[in-house]
Amino acid sequence: MNGREILKKGKHSSKTFTIIYCICIFVIIATFFYAAYKLGNETPEATNFTENGAVGMEPDKYVYMKVDGLSDLIATYGPSESEYTDENEKYYIAISDGYWYIVNLDNETLNKLKEIQSFTFGEIENQPEPVTIYGMTEEVPQELKQIAIDIYNDGLTEEEQMSIEEFDQCYGSVLLNVRKTPEDLTVETIIIGISIIVFVVTVIAHICDKIIRLRVYKYLKNNEYIEDISKQLDDDVEEKFFNDKVIFTKDYFVDTYKSEFCAVKYSDIKWIHTHIVKYNGMVPVSNSIILHLKDGKTNFQCLTIRGTIKQEFENVFSKICEKMPTDSLKGYTRENIKEFKKYKKDLKNNVL
């Protein structure tokens, strides 16, 4: 690859972004059609939840029950402070033919049962027709069992009160959750959600990558370095590192390692130092070389490697230091930070 091709390739982002876009779009479309296929299949026949008082019934069964009585809310779990939001799980005691059952209702189903709930509390005189609800069976959480037992035992003598061992005989072995259906799309929803997040993050990373590349290319173009650096990449390469991805010519440093792009003339560098990202402030995650240019505004991040610093990385850093002007600042120290701030201030005040 000649010098002009290296610069042209450096101007454009890696094909990795396009590959990630394609994968995300494919996963989203494929998952969407699979979910539609699941919903399009015939719903299995529901069994009677109240048969044998739901005693001995297993979880994950598609069932129905006719509700002719409904308690007030007995328990709610979820992220929202408002207990009646549909984000929260909302548990009630539903009555069918005089037997009590625990149900998890959404707002839509609760609205269908409002008249029955009002009749249960004596707010209306005429008994409404029973309403049939559908859902999946699931195990009753231990905490919810205790709440239901306390409600049952309220006002009863000690001899009449129900124990935890007798729970199934009163409420059944499972509860009915109307929020779940045989065509549960939880997994598909999670997959689509993750794919969308990855897609959005990739778009942001792609934009940032493109901005960085254009900054580098603009720097080269504005300083009329393109022809010179192209020629030196063809005819005046002095040394290469990292599988020929990091190149030193007579006057320029060029980094194309791991699809990155940075090209700087040594004489333009005012300050060089490394930047280390650590996990929990202890374990190095990545290391980069930061180049601050003499204009006091432009800086480039070059040669980002994962993990701890390697000898080859140090060799590149040392090589750049050798090529820089003698009045340049080298290393991240308090003195250099202070000196660079003073340099920028003097530059702004036209002191230099």
Image (spheres, rainbow, N blue to C red):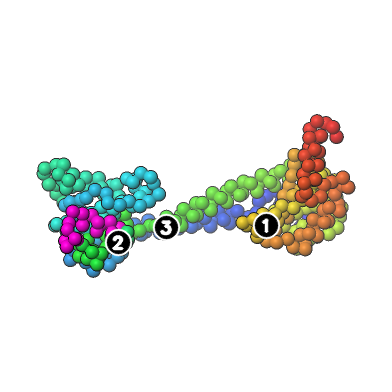
Query: Left or right: 139 with respect to 211?
Result: left
Residue at which label 2 appears? 140
Measured as percent of width and height from the top left, residue 99 is found at 17, 58
Q: Could you say which is closer to the camera, residue 11 or residue 323?
A: 323
Gap in angstroms between the C-alphas marked 3 and 2: 25 Å
Question: Looking at this view, is 151 or 192 the one in front?
Answer: 151
Q: Residues within 10 Å of mark 2 (few under 14, many from 20)?
A: some
- For the point 76% across and 59% down, which residue is it? 313
Q: Earlier in the sequence, mark 3 or mark 2?
A: 2
Q: Earlier in the sequence, mark 1 or mark 2?
A: 2
Q: Earlier in the sequence, mark 3 or mark 1?
A: 3
Q: Position of residue 342 (x, y in %)?
A: 80, 38
Mark 3 or 2: the one toward you: 2
Q: Which residue is mark 3?
A: 188
Q: Amino acid at mark 1?
A: Ser
Q: Is residue 146 magenta?
A: yes
The residue lying toward the viewer, choosing from 13 and 89, is 89
Residue 274, image x and y in percent? Answer: 74, 53
Q: Are marks 1 and 2 in contact (CB under 8 Å)?
A: no
Q: Is residue 253 visible?
A: yes
Is disc 1 surrounded by few (<14), some (14 to 19) or many (20+) residues within 10 Å?
some
Q: Marks 3/1: CA distance?
A: 34 Å
Q: Nearer the viewer, mark 3 or mark 1?
A: 1
Residue drawn 20% across and 65% down? 169
Q: Which of the 4 image quarters holds residue 103?
A: bottom left
Residue at x 21%, y 62% (from the top left corner): 162
Q: Amino acid at mark 2?
A: Val
Q: Secondary structure at mark 3?
A: helix
Q: Is residue 232 visible in the rendered structure shown here? A: no
